Image (cartoon, grey):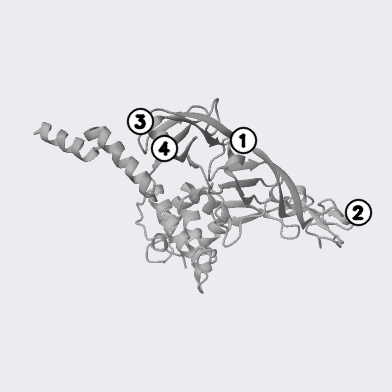
Amino acid sequence: MTKDYYKILGVSKDASKEEIKKAYKKLAKKYHPDINDSDGSADKFKEVSEAAAVLSDDQKKEQYDNFGSDDGQSGFNASGFDFSDFARGSDFGDIFDQVFGGGGGGGFGQRRNHGPQRGSDLRYDIEITLEDAAFGDKKNIIIPRLQTCSRCEGTGAKSGSDVKTCTECHGSGVMKQTRRTPFGIFATTTSCNKCRGEGKIIEEECPVCDGAGRAEKNTKIEITIPKGVEEGSRLRISGEGEAGEKNAPSGDLYIVIHIKKHDVFERRGNDINIDVPISFIQATLGDEINVPTLKGEAKLKIPIGTQTSTIFRMGGKGIPHLQGYGNGDQNVKIIVQTPEKLNKKQKDKLKEFGKLCGDSINPDKTFLKKIRDAF
């Protein structure tokens, strides 16, 4: 009895390829065994993949439309032939990858094996100082990862003579089958079950890695922190991830940068900010002070009558540009400190100073005068 593939996918008989693809994508995501582990999900995923395999192929769809019917009854009977024979010639992993763009791990819970796989990428988070970020540095880190087995050099075999050509696929890694149907001969190619697509089998496994060809080991790696690196930056080190299967290429190592909070400086892009306190006398009479920078102290001139919260720019004292020339700036915010404890003599002198200055140093009276003038 023919299955109603249109009903399985929930589309009409005149549905376009895009509609069929959209319907399959929705159902495949719902029932994929890697996502849905409930009973029957794997069978349901296989069923919708089978339907998509027929309806997304113009030739198969035409034959299905001609000899199948919406009520599940077949208008053609040839020794119990069923249209699911079409889908048996399809690789559900390929169908899934075509819809989802690859990497989805389709194939009824497992993708078709195409031989040794590339090693996995690794991530390592490192915390550095603001100085490290500004001037760059070299760091040594320890990475636990799978590495090529030193005993068998990645073959997985006890000795070179233990690696044999697969007798089933004769080294090709695939098995070809043909199926005769009333509509012609359909050829299918599948991964060899005996060697899992590798074309070779191991008679006696390596005693160190148990035939895996890889073993876990802590590895010391020196990394270079570039000048001007920012919080959250990722550094890619090619080939320093995990080793691939059976000498396949290694993955990459990604270093994620985190910058510690500084006790003095605050970073804003490539500029750095700092608050510097000065005395009332320095602000009034002016002065030359030493200001900390990332490279040590530098001189900064405080003009006469500097007000609190005034910001002075020290050009080129900031963070180097990561992908360019020059540096950011250092912004110095002046904080004028008001004396908190004065003796009687100091208070009398200040009062005398205030009388000498009159309204010129009284911000309240000056402000009120501006208000009156404005109205």
Q: Position of residue 239 (x, y in %)?
A: 70, 43
Q: CA distance from mark 2 to mark 4?
A: 78 Å
Of circles 1 and 3, the one toward us is 3
Q: Earlier in the sequence, mark 2 or mark 4?
A: 2
Residue extending farthest left: 375
Residues at circles 2 and 1 in contact by the CB criterion of under 8 Å: no
Of circles 3 and 2, the one toward us is 3
- Left or right of 180? Residue 369 is left
- In the picture of the structure, the residue carrying the numbered disc 3 is 305
Q: Residue at x 56, y 48 (%)?
A: 258
Number of other residues with Cα within 10 Å of mark 4, as a class: few under 14, some 14 to 19, many 20 or more: many
- In the picture of the structure, the residue carrying the numbered disc 4 is 334
Of circles 2 and 1, the one toward us is 1
Q: Amino acid at mark 4?
A: Ile
Q: Position of residue 262 (x, y in %)?
A: 54, 46
Pick the quarter of the image with the C terminus: top left
Q: CA distance from mark 1 to mark 3?
A: 36 Å
- In the picture of the structure, the residue carrying the numbered disc 2 is 161
- In the picture of the structure, the residue carrying the numbered disc 1 is 135
**Most foreground residue, 261 or 139:** 261
Number of other residues with Cα within 10 Å of mark 3, as a class: few under 14, some 14 to 19, many 20 or more: few
Residue 90 seen in the current view: no
Of circles 4 and 1, the one toward us is 4
Q: Earlier in the sequence, mark 3 or mark 4?
A: 3
